[in-house]
Amino acid sequence: MPAKKKFKDYESAMTRLEEITNLLESGEPKLEEAIKLYTEGLDIAKFCDQRLSEAEKKIKLIAERNGLLTETDFDEDEEEED
């Protein structure tokens, strides 16, 4: 298994996370390899979550600068669509 890789961007991290998911779902990796892949996947998921949080903060900041009067959290939008 390759050494831990630091991803430059969200998209490349998600691509690797999809690869890991496919491998684990295939059932091909032996137990030890599956555990390593799972652990790597958790690290990548954490990285992606941090990137999304940063993006959300930037969007709110931009909205404030442009004088928008209301601020809606992403979660509130999703609940309205259900």
Image: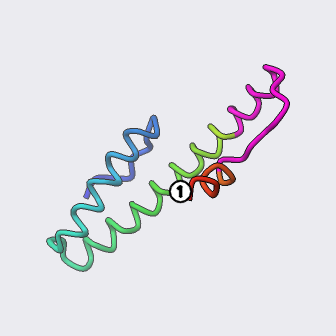
**Disc 1 marks which residue?**
46
Q: Does the magenta stretch include residue 37?
A: no
Residue type, label 1: Lys
Examine the rendered structure and indicate whether residue 22 appears above or below residue 9: below
Q: Please give left or right for residue 29 compared with residue 80 in the image.
A: left
Q: Residue furthest bottom?
A: 31
Question: Please, what secondary structure does the residue beneath circle 1 have?
Answer: helix
Residue at screen point 27% across, 72% down: 34
Quarter the C terminus occupies: bottom right
Rendering colour mode: rainbow
Magenta highlight on residue 65? yes
Q: The magenta stretch spans which residues?
A: 57-74
Q: Nearer the viewer, residue 15 or 1?
A: 15
From the image, which quarter does the N terminus lie in?
bottom left
Against 54, residue 36 (above or below) is below
Q: What percent of the width, then of the height, locates residue 65?
A: 81, 21
Q: In which quarter of the image is residue 15?
A: top left
Left/right placement of residue 68 relative to residue 24 reads right
Q: Residues within 10 Å of mark 1 (few under 14, many from 20)?
A: few
> In the rendered image, which quarter is residue 18 located in?
bottom left
Nearer to the camera, 79 or 62: 79
Q: Which residue is drawn at 18% across and 74% down?
A: 27
Residue 31, position as x, y percentages in the image: 24, 80
Q: What is the count of numbered marks? A: 1
Q: In this view, which residue lies farthest toward the top?
A: 66
Residue occupying image coordinates x 60% and y 48%: 50
Answer above or below: position of 58 versus 46.
Answer: above
Residue 62 appears left or right of 12: right
Q: x, y (%) of residue 60? A: 74, 35
Q: Which of 75 and 41 is in front in this view?
A: 75
44 or 79, which lies in front? 79
Q: Estimate the x, y position of residue 12 in percent, counting from the top left.
A: 37, 40
